[in-house]
Image (spheres, rainbow, N blue to C red):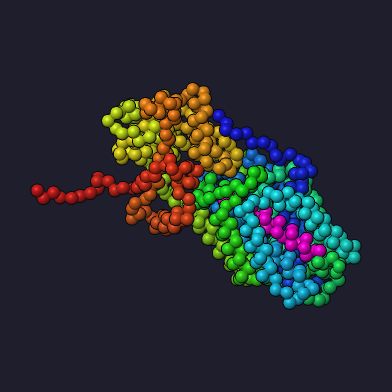
């Protein structure tokens, strides 16, 4: 039975195209602010290098963004949703090891979410130094980033409505500015020939440095896939045609400016602002700042969505997730908002200038690209694409992305270390949480529930046992309806026997589909023991208390259950019986028998547990109706205990 039907919001439309411009292309759309500057920050401007670099940028956007993401990866459509964890959900049953690339990709994306606001907003604000060289830009950047993170708690749906038109202005502006310089140096169109890109990579003495800088033009390509659920693949593909054209115009326009300055050194000049007419620079800085804020907002919102998915998939601690508005997909994760803000402030404090941040940028998203390629190869196998094409896809993109990785690793000592540190920290959190759950589950023992049916039925009617609750609800992880955790049976029968009119078993199954919301009911003992299986998508909020109440109301309405209290007075007046949830918090009492790496994972898990939501809050239960029982999973038995009795 379905609890909710999800409307289709992904059809091709003018509104969808505008939304795509506003929330999909912000990161990749602001890359002209710093890419050309990063490429030519060192050494003398040379004609061959200009053509080679522009050729590399064009073919990177074509091969990496257009073909890999817009054309191929968007085909990995998980019921309209995309992103690294959506892709993992599609293939996770193929092999257990796929969790590793999924976690690496997710942690790298979160690290990218910290760097994007810092570098884009810094690059935009530094345009103020064109007319006021002594102006301190860092405090302005700090204030803007602080305000951006502050408003997250109030929701951004109102701001989101104007994102599309504002980004339309941005892309139109950069395209027109680029064209104005292209007409002055039309020879830049020679860069469309891939010969110049290959020659530059093969011949240039600092080829790896250039590759690392060129890679920055495609950062944000992952957002095309991650935000597919907000816009739909048709809107993304059509709007990308416009976005790519405007980006190429601007890059080639900056190349035209460079052609006029061959033989000189660029110094602190940013070609992005240099191609603007002097009278327009002030307006250009304002529009660039707005675009940078929109790009940052998109990354922050994407990080919230990513964490909500990670929580459902049990690879991130259970954290508070709020819904500040009724806007579709709008959510706010306070803990992640704080983590991203601290990360941004750390990057601004360490590097201060965007030219130094460029060294830290790119490495994290490069790792995400590689992990996406791994998962896509498995996905293509799943949909029965010819293995020859899968091998060609895998070898081609692994080669490109490993070359980019080598270029980004060159920047490791210049700032890439911070990216790696941030991503590694996030990976440790995810892997430890996932690993600890696996370790704990290995100690859970299940028993056949059917032999207990007569005992449970008798206990329910046993007047010598005081009533614990009219309705007693247990959350169970048993997938098989005929099985139950031995600890639950111990809780009902041994640990202070719990008498109830009706016993309920609730099982939650996180589905590979993002927006599934269904349930099934089975009366194991009619009117005495009832099992409810919820099937919830990995993007659905697990408000078990509310969902359970809805199911019970439906059952009462259909006459499947009578929840009227059995207390004489209350029954006489038609009052419902009380409900009590029993949550078993599984703990590992002794760790001496575990392997060394398992002990480390559990120690990290214990630390993370202090900052995560409690078991009952994690499942959306009202704590006033919850009994929490701590259950040791590995209690030593008396079997191996040797002791001598004296008398």
Q: Is residue 190 magenta?
A: no
Q: Nearer the viewer, residue 571 or 432?
A: 571
Most foreground residue, 463 or 38? 463
Q: Taking the image as drawn, is residue 204 in sight?
A: no
Which residue is pictured at 31% across the width and 34% down the height?
A: 466
**Rendering quarter of residue 107:** bottom right
Relative image position of residue 623 (x, y in whole percent) = 44, 44
Task: Residue lying at the far top in this picture: please name it.
Answer: 559
Query: Is 61 above or below relative to 212?
Result: above
Q: Residue at x 49, y 30 (%)?
A: 552
Name which residue lies at 85% across and 69% down: 278
Q: Is residue 13 left or right of residue 606?
A: right
Quadrant (top left/top right/bottom left/bottom right) for the N terminus: top right
Query: Relative to the observer, which residue lies in front, 647 or 2?
Result: 2
Q: Which residues are magenta?
A: 283-307
Where is residue 59, by image quadrant?
bottom right
Write the residue at 52% across / 51% down: 319
Residue extending furthest toward the right? 183
Q: Position of residue 136 (x, y in %)?
A: 70, 73
Count the labels in the image.
Answer: 0
Q: Main secondary structure of the magenta part?
A: helix
Residue 484 image offset from top left, x and y in percent: 39, 36
Horizontally, is 642 left or right of 521 in the view? Answer: left
- Image: 643 above or below 345: above
- Residue 547 pos. (x, y %): 52, 36
Q: Tell me if residue 383 can be seen.
A: yes
Describe residue 24's horizontal placement relative to residue 583 as left or right.
Answer: right
> Is residue 303 highlighted in magenta?
yes
């Amino acid at each position: 039975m379905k609890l909710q039907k999800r409307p289709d919001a992904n059809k091709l439309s003018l509104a969808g195209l505008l939304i795509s411009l506003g929330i999909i292309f912000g990161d990749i759309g602001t890359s002209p602010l710093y890419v050309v500057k990063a490429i030519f920050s060192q050494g003398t401007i040379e004609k061959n290098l200009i053509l080679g670099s522009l050729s590399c940028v064009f073919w990177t956007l074509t091969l990496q963004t257009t073909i890999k993401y817009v054309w191929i990866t968007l085909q990995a459509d998980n019921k309209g949703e995309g992103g690294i964890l959506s892709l993992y959900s599609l293939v996770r049953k193929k092999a257990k090891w796929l969790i590793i690339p999924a976690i690496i990709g997710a942690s790298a994306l979160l690290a990218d979410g910290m760097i994007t606001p810092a570098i884009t907003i810094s690059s935009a604000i530094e345009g103020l130094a064109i007319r006021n060289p002594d102006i301190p830009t860092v405090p302005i950047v700090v204030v803007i980033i602080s305000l951006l993170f502050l408003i997250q708690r109030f929701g951004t749906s109102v701001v989101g409505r104007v994102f599309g038109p504002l980004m339309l202005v941005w892309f139109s502006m950069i395209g027109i500015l680029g064209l104005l310089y292209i007409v002055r140096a039309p020879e830049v169109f020679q860069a469309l020939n891939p010969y110049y890109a290959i020659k530059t990579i093969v011949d240039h003495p600092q080829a790896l440095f250039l590759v690392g800088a060129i890679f920055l033009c495609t950062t944000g390509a992952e957002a095309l896939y991650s935000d597919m659920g907000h816009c739909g693949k048709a809107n993304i593909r059509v709007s990308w045609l416009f976005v790519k054209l405007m980006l190429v115009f601007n890059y080639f326009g900056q190349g035209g400016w460079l052609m006029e300055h061959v033989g000189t050194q660029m110094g602190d000049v940013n070609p992005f602002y240099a191609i603007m007419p002097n009278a327009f620079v002030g307006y250009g800085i304002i529009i660039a700042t707005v675009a940078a804020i929109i790009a940052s907002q998109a990354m922050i919102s994407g990080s919230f969505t990513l964490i909500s998915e990670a929580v459902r998939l049990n690879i991130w601690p259970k954290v508070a997730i709020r819904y500040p508005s009724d806007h579709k997909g709008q959510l706010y994760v306070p803990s992640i908002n704080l983590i991203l803000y601290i990360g941004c402030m750390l990057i601004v404090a360490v590097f201060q200038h965007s030219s130094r941040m460029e060294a830290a940028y790119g490495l994290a998203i490069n790792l995400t690209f590689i992990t996406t390629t791994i998962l896509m190869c498995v996905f293509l196998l799943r949909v029965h694409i010819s293995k020859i094409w899968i091998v060609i896809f895998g070898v081609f993109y692994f080669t490109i992305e490993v070359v980019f990785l080598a270029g980004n690793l060159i920047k490791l000592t210049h700032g890439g270390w911070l990216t790696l540190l941030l991503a590694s920290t996030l990976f440790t959190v995810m892997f430890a949480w996932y690993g600890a759950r696996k370790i704990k589950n290995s100690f859970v023992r299940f028993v056949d529930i059917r032999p207990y049916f007569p005992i449970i039925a008798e206990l329910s009617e046993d007047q010598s046992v005081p009533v614990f609750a009219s309705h007693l609800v247990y959350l169970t992880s048993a997938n098989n309806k005929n099985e139950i955790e031995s600890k639950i049976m111990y809780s009902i029968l041994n640990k202070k026997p719990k008498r109830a009119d009706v016993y309920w078993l609730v099982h939650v199954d996180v589905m590979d589909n993002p927006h599934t919301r269904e349930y099934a009911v089975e009366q194991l003992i009619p009117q005495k023991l009832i099992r409810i299986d919820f099937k919830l998508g990995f993007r659905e909020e697990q408000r078990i208390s509310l969902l359970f109440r809805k199911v019970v109301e439906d059952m009462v309405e259909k006459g499947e259950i009578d929840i009227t209290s059995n207390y004489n007075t209350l029954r006489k007046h038609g009052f419902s019986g009380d409900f009590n949830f029993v949550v078993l918090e599984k703990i590992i009492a002794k760790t001496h028998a575990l392997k060394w790496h398992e002990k480390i994972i559990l120690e990290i898990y214990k630390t993370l547990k202090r900052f995560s939501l409690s078991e009952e809050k994690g499942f959306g239960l009202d704590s006033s109706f919850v009994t929490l029982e701590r259950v040791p999973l590995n209690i030593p038995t008396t079997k191996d205990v040797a002791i001598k009795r004296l008398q």
